[in-house]
Amino acid sequence: MRIRGHLYRPGSSERVEAVLARDGGGRFRLVRADGDDAGRDVGLRVAGPLLAGVPRTIALDTGERFVPFEEPPGAFLGETGTGPWRRVTSPGRVTPFRMAVLAALVVLAIAGLRAAAPVAADLAAALVPHRTEALMGELAFREIDALALEPSELAESHKARLRAAARALARLGGVDPAPEVRFRRAPALGANAFAFPGGPILVTDELVELLGDDDRVVAVLAHELGHVEARHGLRQALRIGGVFLIASLALGGDETLMEELVALTVSIDAAGYSRTFEREADAFAGRLLPAAGRSPGDLADALRILIEDCGERCEGGGWLSTHPDASSRIEALTDRPGTD
Ligand SMILES: [Zn+2]
């Protein structure tokens, strides 16, 4: 069984065509299509769920990435497919504090209460240093950047104006350090904005063009700042990752664990934040925009425009599928600005 695809160097968008073959014993062999090598045996694992419009990534043990032209049949990947709970490895340094947290988490897990999962996740999030969170966001950004993003075609002066507005909002809202705003053209994602854990914030050229008015883009940035400030990306990753992942993290994660968190972060961008997190980010923008002499109505306008435009993407992922109750949110922003 063999599949064709692109092979990416670690941390690079440079790629060559390659063929990944699986033999009867479940071993994988990679051959570059340009005939540069005679092929080599590789170990692999499959990164998290698909981001809408982005092909599945197969991570090789060499640090390279293989992106198949078409979704491979389930039998091809077989036993190598991993969820976050299957790659967690040996714990690091155990401190009494971490043991106490772990004990609390185990009690919550045994209680089997679904309602306890967010509590456990937020408890664990408090243990994750900001620099770990930022690293997680940075790695997830690079993953998506290499696979689905192209350089922005917006004018430098235009990007600088939007960045300056975002910095001013971050300062006013106490979001410290101020997240970096990165602009990219993204044909696969369309009009979108994502807040990665600890920043950066991705804004697509398509979003800037569709909204057609910088005040609306800035309003979306205020909403994304709300996600960064409340650490929604990290908290959501821990919620999805489940108690086992949380316990491992509390005990001191290793690189593999970080990879899982990055894969989870990528998948969150596809699945979207919970409604609670969206309302929190809206409420944050609803308070921040008037304080900056702006109108929360700009965010409501942005939502309206995105709803009219999204079509298939509304179901396939992205900013709007992350905002399933958009009309009630528009009402909240227009009827009770800044009071939420
Ligand atoms: Zn949001």
Image: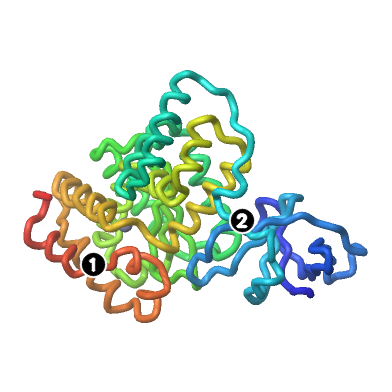
87 lies above or below 218: above
**Residue found at the very far right of the displayed protein:** 38
Q: Quadrant of residue 330?
A: bottom left
| Residue type, label 1 | Asp
144 lies above or below 92: below
| Residue type, label 2 | Thr
* Of residues 249 and 4, the one drawn nearer to the viewer in this rendering: 249
Query: Pointer 1: what residue?
Result: 325
Q: Is residue 13 visible?
A: no
44 lies above or below 324: above
**Residue found at the very far left of the displayed protein:** 335
Residue 170 percent coordinates (x, y) = 30, 41
Q: Residue at x 35, y 41 (%)?
A: 111
* Of residues 255 and 116, the one drawn nearer to the viewer in this rendering: 116
Residue 217 percent coordinates (x, y) = 30, 60
Q: Quadrant of residue 97?
A: top left
Secondary structure beneath label 1: loop
Residue 162 percent coordinates (x, y) = 34, 54
Query: Pointer 2: what residue?
Result: 82
